[in-house]
Image (cartoon, rainbow, N blue to C red):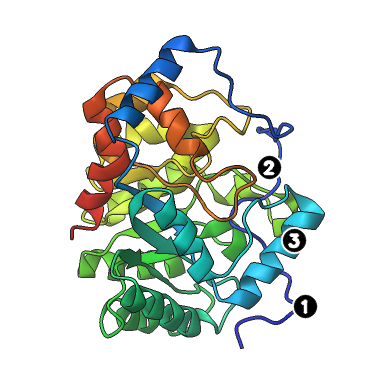
Amino acid sequence: MIADEHTTIAPCCATVSRTLVVPELRELSDDDVVGAAREGDRRARGLLRGVTDAHVHLWPAPIYRALWRWFDEHAWRIAFRGSAEDTLAHVAQSGVSRAVSLLYAHKAGIARELNRFAASMQRAHPWVVALGTASPEDSDAVEVVREALGPLDLRGIKLHCHVQRVAIDDPRVVAILRECERAGAPAVVHCGREPASDAYGIDTHSICAHARCERVLQQLPRLKLVVPHVGLDELDAYLRLTDRYEGLYLDTSMACAEYFEHVIDWAALEQRAARVAYGTDFPITPYAYDRELRVLARRIESDLAFERIVRGTSLTLWPT
């Protein structure tokens, strides 16, 4: 059993600490006339349909229930609540044509079961690209990764440094990532300092930093590494790293939804569009599913850059 009705787990994105503030939920403003016109034009031309969401969470039902309880008590109210099948139906109805499914092992001993669940979702839904996971606590973590990327045909590995309480440059994590490099499979690792929460029970700023990420990229030069939330409070540093390491990518997940009170350098992000993938973190979000896509449609000026972010970069990482 992965989890039961009384399971308590740390979520993917929690109440942020230190550097970021979660404001009251508010609707996007139409004061930016140019941006609103750009969004409307792209919608009319169909550019907001047929996109890839590179950060969707598909979980077994007990873990969803645990996440809802945690967020109700400690963070925002998750707007959409349903099963993995319900989640995919909502994504598809929103015009997305491809979804990258992510999950992570929040404790030792459950990665194999989670990976079997992820593989079952991928088999049932050919438009889903499913990644597996591994726990650095498990002595057989490398074997778990080999099974995920081999017999289960999963397309990468997802790790979460906050939840798993481990730095990306920890030798146990490096061993997992080395196996991804060997297989040519992308690794999605929440190794940025934020969003964070005291509920994780660890100082995320002590175990996460762009410098740790760079050390891993130096050790594993052929690794394709995706850092979610565009590195958030260290966005500028992560963007600079993409200039130096061809295997480093970022995804937008919640960071580009204009929900957190932090400043995005949209011009710098646009310049690295080929290394940035649109992702939502759905369904662990407190707002309408298309919010982040609408913001990107307003903020990214170039059609070419916009299409790279919402389609092209994900296809580079996970070819059809």
Is 12 placed left or right of 221 in the picture?
Answer: right
Circle 3 packing at 10 Å, graded few (<14), some (14-19), many (20+), is many
Q: Is residue 223 above or below residue 6?
A: above
Which quadrant of the figure has residue 172?
A: bottom left
Q: CA distance from mark 2 to mark 1?
A: 24 Å
Q: Residue at x 55, y 84 (%)?
A: 109
Q: CA distance from mark 3 to mark 1?
A: 11 Å
The first of marks 2 and 3 along the sequence is 2
The picture places residue 299, in percent across and down from the top left corner, at 41, 22
**Residue 37 in the image, given as x and y percentages of width and height:** 40, 16
Return the residue found at the far front: 44
Q: Secondary structure at mark 1?
A: loop
Compared to residue 66, the image places residue 225 above or below, namely above
Q: Is residue 55 visible?
A: no
What residue did someone put label 1 on? Answer: 6
Q: Quadrant of residue 105?
A: bottom right
Q: CA distance from mark 2 to mark 3?
A: 14 Å
Residue receiving disc 2: 16
Residue farthest to the right? 73
Residue that mark 3 sits on = 70
Which residue is located at x 49 percent, y 79 percent?
114
Residue type of the residue flagged with mark 2: Val
Labels 2 and 1 touching (C-beta < 8 A): no
In terms of depth relative to the viewer, which is nearer, 92 or 283?
A: 92
